[in-house]
Amino acid sequence: MNHYVYEFSEGSRDMADLLGGKGANLAEMTRLGLPVPPGFTVTTTACRAFLATGVEPPELAGEVAHALAALERAAGRGLGRAGDPLLLSVRSGGRYSMPGMMETILDIGLCDATVAGLAKASGQKRFAWDSYRRLLQMFGHTVMGVDGELFERTLAALKAGRGVAGDHELDAADLILLTEQFKALIHRETGERFPQDPVEQLHRAIRAVFASWNGERARVYRRRDHIPDDLGTAVTVQAMVFGNLGEDSGTGVAFTRDPATGERGVYGDYLSDAQGEDVVSGVRDAVPLARLKQLAPRAYVELSDHLRTLERHYQDLCDVEFTLERGKLWILQTRVGKRTAEAAFRIAYDLLDERLIDRHEALSRVSGAQLTRLLFPCFATSNDVAPLATGIAASPGAAVGAVVFDSATAVRRAAAGEPVVLVRTETTPDDLPGMIAARAVLTTRGGKTSHAAVVARGMGRVCVCGAESVVVDLERRSLTTRSGVTVREGDTVSVDGTAGTVHLGALPLTASDVGRALESGERTGPLSQAVRRALSHADRVRRLEVRANADTPEDAARARRFGAQGIGLCRTEHMFLGERKALVEAVILADDEAAREQALAALLPPQRSDFTAILAAMDGLPVTIRLLDPPLHEFLPDRTELAVRVATAASPDPHDVQLLAAVERMHERNPMLGLRGVRLALAVPGLVAVQVRAIAEAVAQRMRDGGHPRAEIMIPLVGAVEELRLVRAEVERVLAEVSGETGQSVRCPVGTMIELPRAALTAGRIAQAADFFSFGTNDLTQTTWGLSRDDAEASFFPGYLDKGILSGSPFETLDEEGVGRLITIAVREGRAAHPRLTTGVCGEHGGDPASIDFFHRAGIDYVSCSPFRVPSARLEAGRAALVAKLP
Ligand code: PEP
Ligand code: MG
C-alpha cells in the first residue's frame, strides 16, 4: 500500500528515492539489528504533495500519529510526558546528499510542562534548560521565521551582563532567564506564542523541513550539482539521544577505512561530553577515534563490530555518526562515504582483493575524472586560500613560478634555471618557445579551445585561460586584478589548472607519483598498482580505441607510453611555429610562380623529417595527419602592430611594407568561418601537393627502413562532398607519383573531419569519398551553436550558467542533444553509404570523461585526446562498455 510514513523497520536502502539517503540507511541499519534510536521517515512524495498544494496530504497527520505511537513504545517514553519526556529530532534528507542546505530541528517535545521532567530524568538542570533555549532558538527561527540574529543578540546581551564570554559559562538560572527572553522575543516578533503542544511542534517542524527544499541555499546547491528541482526531501523523525550528559557520554564520526588515503583500518574523531553540533562547530578539539578504546573500551569494541558489519553489508567505505549516552552506543546515521581520488582507487581494489566486490564493480567505482586528478601535481591547500583571480581550468595540474609577460623573457629566465609563469592576453604561435619554457600559462582571454589551452594541454603544461578580471600592463610589466592587487614581473604566483585559479605566492606542491609510474612503467606503491589494475581491466572490456592528438615525435612517444593506440590528430600547422614560420610567410609573399614553387619546396624537408620521426614513434599504429587548417594570416605578424611600425618608421622596412599589404589583403572579419581548412587547400595551388609529398616520402622512407608506417590523410572543414573529391584526387595523384618515384607502394586512407553541420547532414554523400570520418567537435560545437570557441566561455557563459541555460560548457562536455544528434546522424548515414567507414572524435571532447560514454553509445570507433588524457580516456571507455552491458 502507498503511504506517506515509513517506520524504520519498514524501509530499506533501496528506497532512497522515497525515504532519502538518510532515511533509507537508517531503515537498513535497523533491519541489520544495529542500535539505531527508533524513528520513522515521512516520504519525498508527501513533500512533493505539500510543495504542489501548500498543504500536507490529509492522510499525513494520522499516519504520523500512528508511527509516533510505535516510536514511543520503542523508546519507552512519551512525547509531552511531564515525567520523562521523549524528545525528537526532525531532519531533512533527500535522494542526494545536500549537507547543511536544508533545515534540522532538534529537541522537539520540550515545553514548559516537560523541561522540569527532563531535568529530573537526566539529573542535569542546566542541560535541560539549555536544550529548551536551543529549541526556542531553532524553532523560532526556522519554523516561525524570526530573524536568527535577534536570538544571538539576546544571548550576547545576557553574557555581557554576566561578564562571561562562552555559552557554557551560563548557569541554569541564566538559561531559565534566557528561555523567558526568547519566548518574549518570539511573541513580539510574530504576535504568536511558542507552541506548548509537542505534537503541534512536530507537525510544524515537518512542514518547515518540507519548505526548506525550496530555500535559496538548497536551490543554488542543486543547480551547481545538477540535482533535479522536483525530487523533494524526506523528513526523518527520530528519538533524540544525548552525548552531553557527562564523561561517559560523547559523540563522534567513524569511517570504515581512511577516506583520504584509502588505507585499511578504522578512522574518525571523538568528542566526549558533547552533541553533534559541537563537533561541527569545532568549539573543542576532537580526539582520534582510537582514544575511545581507552575511554570506553566496551563501546569501542561494539562500534568496531558495527563498522565491520556495515562495510560487509554495503561492500564499500561507510561513514557513521554515533553517540554514546551514558555508556550506551547509538548509531545515528550511515552512508557510503565520500573519498578522495586516491582513496577511491585503493579502496576499490582492496575490496576486490577481499572478495567483497568483483572486477566490474571495482572498475565502476573509479572514474576518469579521479584519475585525471591523480595524474597531475596539485596544491593540497588551494581550496583554503582566496585566489588572486579565477579563469577557465584549461589544462590540469599545478605549478609555481615567477610571472613573465613575453615569450623571450620566459625563455631567458627559464634557461637561467628560474621557474616561470607566462602571462599573456592570449597566446599566438609566436609564444610557443615561451610556453615550452614556462611551468604554467595564464591568459586573460579565450576558452577551453583557445590556442593557449590546446597547446598547453598537448604539452601537459598547466594552463588557466580567460581570467578576465586580470588586466595586463605590458608597459609597466605588471598585472592588476579586479580587487586592485598588482603583481610585477618576477613576483611569484601559483597556478592551479585543475581548479582554474591563480594565487599570490608559492603554495606547497604535491607531485604526482601516479603520472610518473604510469609513464615509466615502473612498479611503485599500492596506489599506482590499483590504477594500473583499473586501466588493464578497462583495456580488456572497452570497445572504443583511444588515440592521441600529437604533433611532435616527443608527444607521440609519450602518448604511446600512456597507452595510446595511434594518433587521431596531428595538426600540421604546429610544425610551422617559431623559426619555421618564415617558411609559410615566404609562400604567402611569393609574387610569381617561380618564387611560389621555391617557397613551397622549402616546406618539404622539415615536414618530411617530422613525419618520419612521428611515424617511427607510432610504428605499426595509425597516424592521422591533418592538412593545414588555420587561415594563413595566422602565420603573419599582428595587423595593428605592423601598421604602427610602418606608419612610425622614418623609412619603413620594405619587407614590413610587403607584409602589411599581405596582411591587409588577407584580413577577414570572421576568420574562423573564412579561408581555412579545405578551402585553403583549394585556394592555394601546390599546398596540398607539398604536404602529401612530405607524408608519402616519409612513409616510403619508413618502409625502406623496415618500419610499418600507417599514415592517414585528413582534410579539415569539409562542407560539401565536391570539396573532398577535388582534394582527394590531388592527394591520390601525389601518392601515385611518390610510389612511382620511390618504388614503394605508398597507400594512405584519405578521410575528412566532420566539423560543420552541413557535413554531418550530408554525411551519406561525403562518406562516398571518405575512408574515415573524424569529428572535430570543437568546430562542430562552435558551428552548431553559432558560438565563438575563442570568446564565449570567458564572456557570457558565466551568466548562462547562473540562469540555468547551460549546466556546463558545451566546449568541455559534449552537448548530446544538439551536437550529439548531428554526430549520430552522420555516423548512421555515413556507415549506410560506406559500411567500412572508420569514425573517430578528435576534438577536446575525445578526452572528456563525461562525453566518452556518449561516444561509446553513438558507435564511434575511437576517441583521440592530448597524451596526458589518454589514461583517463581508456578508463572511461572501459566504464562506458560496462555500463552499456547493464540490464
Ligand atoms: C576540432 O575542431 O574539433 C578540431 C579537432 O580541430 P581544431 O581544434 O584544430 O580546429
Ligand atoms: Mg577544427
Image (cartoon, grey):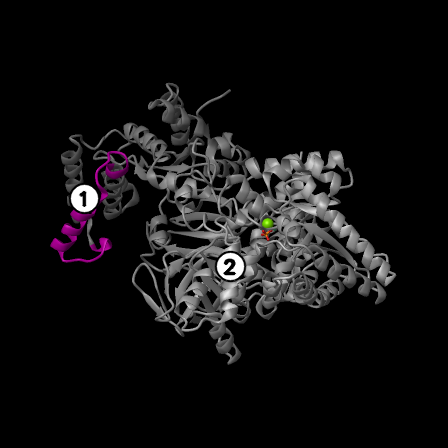
Residue 150's disc is: 1
Please tell me which residue lies in front, 721 or 453: 721
Magenta segment range? Answer: 140-169
Which label sits in the foreground, 1 or 2? 2
Disc with the residue nearer the chain's start (1 vs 2)? 1
The answer to which image quadrant residue 120 occupies is top left
Q: Which mark is residue 663?
A: 2
Residue appearing at x 46%, y 60% in the figure: 639
CB of mark 2 near ligand 1 (< 8 Å): no
Q: Position of residue 266 (x, y in %)?
A: 52, 56
Residues 112 and 229: in front is: 229
- Residue 461 point in image, percent of width and height: 54, 64
* Residue pictured at 79% horizontal, 55% vertical: 735
Please check the rendered image and state whether residue 41 is part of the magenta-colored stretch, yes or no.
Answer: no
Disc 1, SS = helix
The residue type indicated by label 2 comes to Val
User: Does any portion of residue 33 appear in the rendered image?
Assistant: no
Q: How many marks?
A: 2
Q: Quadrant of residue 382?
A: bottom left
Q: Main secondary structure of the magenta part?
A: helix
